[in-house]
């Protein structure tokens, strides 16, 4: 395959460094240009695969450049960055931008979208803008996984005024609904399309998704937590054990490494301190179901691969006199990166459930920081809500 070309129109040199770092292992050349005129001239001389344009100076307008690119290089995938302005995001969709990110750019999501843009064979008509008012946006989306990912990112930026945690929760919930429509209603058939509407009021966000399928019902699944009877919250575990569906584990990494800034902050360590890093692949019924990453202070425990493959981590911690007593965890969603997809046996870009957890023992010590990803189709999250007042039911 011939080398791909990335054109960058952004006055911030840090953006070039960021992109160069992302693509250092890919066969992709990066060219920087200063402004709209130079970008158009470059495209007329040599087409590019992907163009990344950020907020400019001296009157530079990335949306104006996008309109010109559609004339001189209609096949280029254009990723814009700028203010979290719903009108600008809608303008980007209208003129067939590949994606839109708020500035400053966040490396992880941008890297995934950039890789997708470089790899996708077709994309032009995957997202159609039907209604273009910021308070009422309607999109027509092709039944493709990458189209669902792009739509989710556009929605994330359209709702950019929401607090960051709320915005991410909305994006994760929206993507799950959209993927259900694409996978179950449309059966992943790119000839079919899903109609998506978002209506924003002063106090709520209403999402309506209409897929081309006949609908589906949730049958009784005794091995899933969602089917547990009220008086037996772990019945699904017993059913799986009775059926011989016990999980298995393969250790991929078991080594002492220098703690990153994120890990240091979670574990309360000083710069330069070391941690035990575990990467494990969990199997159920012979299929990979989770990729788990754990960081543990080296002063607490040393574990061999053999015992990790035979016993659970918390079981081993308790056997060493370390008793997990409390944890704070965040559950979200993401798109599978290429390494994650390969290990979990999923197509790249598939929705994964993510869990980030900090665990404390009975004395309040931080004993573990974990970052796990799970195959979404193999996990269910079930919560019981109560009002906290006797005699009243939660609604």
Image (tube, rainbow, N blue to C red):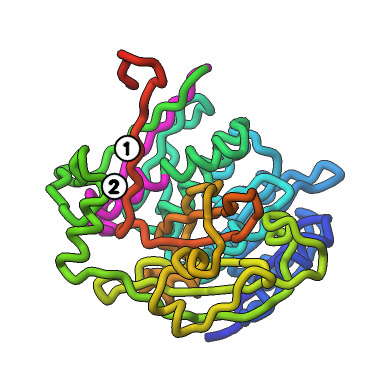
Is 133 on the left or on the right of 312, as rendered?
A: right
Outermost top residue: 391
Identity of the residue drawn at 52% across and 66% down: 317
Residue 325 in percent (x, y) is at: 52, 50
Residue for badge 1: 209
- Residue 277, horizontal then vertical, whole percent: 61, 73
Neighbour class for label 2 at 10 Å: few (<14), some, many (≥20)?
many
In the picture, the disc for residue 10 is none
The residue under the point 65% across, 61% down is: 51
| Number of numbered markers | 2
Q: Is residue 197 left or right of residue 67?
A: left
Disc 1 element: strand
| 177 within the magenta span | yes
- Contact (Cβ within 8 Å) of mark 1 with mark 2: yes
Does any portion of residue 39 appear in the rendered image?
no
Q: Is residue 213 above or below residue 118?
A: above
| Above or below for 136 versus 31 | above
Question: Where is mark 2, residue-wise?
Answer: 181
- The residue positioned 79% from the left and 46% from the top of the image is 60
Asked if 272 appears above or below 159 in the picture, the reply is: below
Mark 1 or mark 2, which has the lower sequence index? Answer: 2
Chain part drawn in magenta: 175-202
Residue 121 lies in quadrant: bottom left
The residue at the far right in this view is 58
| Residue 381 placement (x, y as % from top left) | 35, 46
| Label 1: how many Cα within 10 Å (few below 14, some 14–19, many 20+) | some
Q: Quadrant of the rendered structure where residue 229 is? A: top left
Q: Viewer-proximal residue, 119 or 217? A: 217
Q: In which quadrant of the rendered image does the C terminus lie?
A: top left
Work out how far the residue at label 1 is from the one at label 2, CA to CA, in angstroms: 7 Å
């Amino acid at each position: 395959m011939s080398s791909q070309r990335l054109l960058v129109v952004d006055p911030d040199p840090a953006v070039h460094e960021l992109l160069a770092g992302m693509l250092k292992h890919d066969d992709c050349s990066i060219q920087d240009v200063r402004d709209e005129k130079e970008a158009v001239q470059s495209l007329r001389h040599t087409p590019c695969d992907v163009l990344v344009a950020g907020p400019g100076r001296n009157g530079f307008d990335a949306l104006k450049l996008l309109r010109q690119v559609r004339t001189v290089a209609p096949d280029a995938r254009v990723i814009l960055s700028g203010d979290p302005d719903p009108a600008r995001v809608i303008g980007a969709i209208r003129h067939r931008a590949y994606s839109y990110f708020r500035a400053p750019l966040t490396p992880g999501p941008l890297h995934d979208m950039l890789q997708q843009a470089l790899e996708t064979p077709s994309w032009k008509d995957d997202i159609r803008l039907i209604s273009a008012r910021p308070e009422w946006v309607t999109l027509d989306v092709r039944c493709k996984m990458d189209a669902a990912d792009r739509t989710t990112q556009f929605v994330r930026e359209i709702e950019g005024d929401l607090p960051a945690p709320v915005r991410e929760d909305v994006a994760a919930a929206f993507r799950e609904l959209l993927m259900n429509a694409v996978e179950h209603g449309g059966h992943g058939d790119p000839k079919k399309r899903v109609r998506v509407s978002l209506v924003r009021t002063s106090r709520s966000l209403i999402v309506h998704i209409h897929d081309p399928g006949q609908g589906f019902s949730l049958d009784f699944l005794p091995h899933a937590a969602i089917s547990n009877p009220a008086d037996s919250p772990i019945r699904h575990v017993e059913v799986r054990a009775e059926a011989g569906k016990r999980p298995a584990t393969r250790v991929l990494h078991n080594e002492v490494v220098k703690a990153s800034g994120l890990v240091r902050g979670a574990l309360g360590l000083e710069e330069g301190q070391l941690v035990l890093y575990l990467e494990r692949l969990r199997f159920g019924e012979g299929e990979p179901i989770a990729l788990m990453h754990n960081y543990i202070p080296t002063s607490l425990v040393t574990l061999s691969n053999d015992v990790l493959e035979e016993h659970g981590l918390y079981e081993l911690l308790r056997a060493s006199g370390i008793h997990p007593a409390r944890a704070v965890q965040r559950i979200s969603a993401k798109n599978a990166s290429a390494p994650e997809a390969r290990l979990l046996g999923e197509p790249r870009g598939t929705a994964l459930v993510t869990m980030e957890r900090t665990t404390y023992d009975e004395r309040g010590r931080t004993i573990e920081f974990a970052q796990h990803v799970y195959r979404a189709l193999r996990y269910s999250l079930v919560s019981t809500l109560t009002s906290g007042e006797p005699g009243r039911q939660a609604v």
